Amino acid sequence: MKIGFLLIIACVLVYRLDAKTAYCILRPEPGSTVKGNVTFTQEDSSSPTVIEAVIEGLSPKAKQGFHVHQTANFTNGCVSAGPHFNPTNKPHGDPRSEERHAGDMGNLVADSKGVAYYKEVDPYMTMFGANSIIGRSCMVHQDEDDLGKGGHNDSKTTGHAGARLACAEIIEGTLESNGSAGFLWKFSLLIVIGGAFYYFCVHRTEKRYAVLED
């Protein structure tokens, strides 16, 4: 019996309680039709961040800039959210390059219906420590991000991506729970799995040994 409880405790300890998830629900600026959801997942502080998004209302078959900005201040709309999030003071660039802003996510690429499905594994973006993106904002722009290579005056700061069409705060939690309930759901699932493991792999084994000893 004691062995079973110890195994359940071990399962709880092995479970990555340090993993983080975050999300934002993009809302359009006046006159814009852009909206959608973005999720971020990071297993631990040394792991890459997985970014997934489904965005609609974009220009059909167009590329449009997609970034994390400094703040989630929307008192004057998306324009109040400040510049790209850039804690290491690097030039704007390609998200796959080390020389880039922490908030550089490149471009959304829309299909013929103006919907973009985005997924990237980002080794430079984090949800841990002083450079965490949590509490900052996601931003969709009107034009294509030139990834710092366009030769425009603002290529190295904004990618010449144009006006801000939609934005939202990056909130720790999950879209399904919109907050801390996500942890409770995971913990409950863990307890169920641990209980099943105990019953089938430990309890029945202990019962079999008890029969043999008798």
Image (spheres, helix red, strand yellow):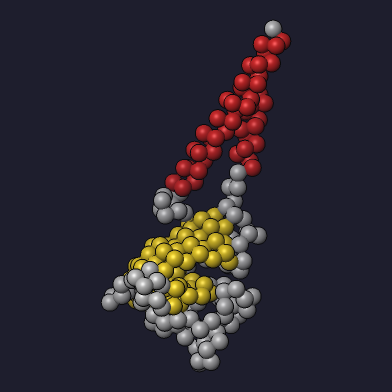
Q: Quadrant of residue 82?
A: bottom left
Q: Residue furthest front?
A: 112
Residue 43 visible to an observer of this rendering = yes
Q: Image height check: is 193 above or below 179? A: above
> Residue at left 54%, top 38%?
190
**How far from the left and from the top, in percent, is residue 71?**
46, 71
The residue located at (42%, 69%) in the rendering is: 116
State the count of labels.
0
Figure quadrant of the N terminus: top right
Judging depth in this view, the residue of 132 and 21 nearest the camera is: 21
Image-based side of 39 in relation to 194, left or right: left
Residue that lies at the very extreme toward the top in this rendered image: 214
Rendering coords of residue 180 (x, y %): 45, 49
Image quadrant containing the C terminus: top right
> Viewer-proximal residue, 214 or 113?
113
Q: Position of residue 207 (x, y in %)?
A: 63, 16
Query: What residue lies at 42% left-to-right and 82% top-to-bottom?
Result: 143
Query: Looking at the image, is 210 positioned above or below residue 99?
Result: above
Q: Is residue 146 left or right of residue 197?
A: left
Q: Residue at x 55, y 30 (%)?
A: 196
- Choose between 45 and 145: the one closer to the eye: 145
Q: Residue furthest left?
A: 31
Residue 64 horizontal/vertical position (percent): 43, 77
| On screen, residue 71 above or below 129 | below
In depth, the one of 36 and 77 nearer the eye is 36
Residue projecting furthest to the right: 213
Q: Does residue 130 appear in this view? A: no
The correct choice, above or below, for 204 with respect to 134 in the image is: above
**Image quarter of residue 32:** bottom left
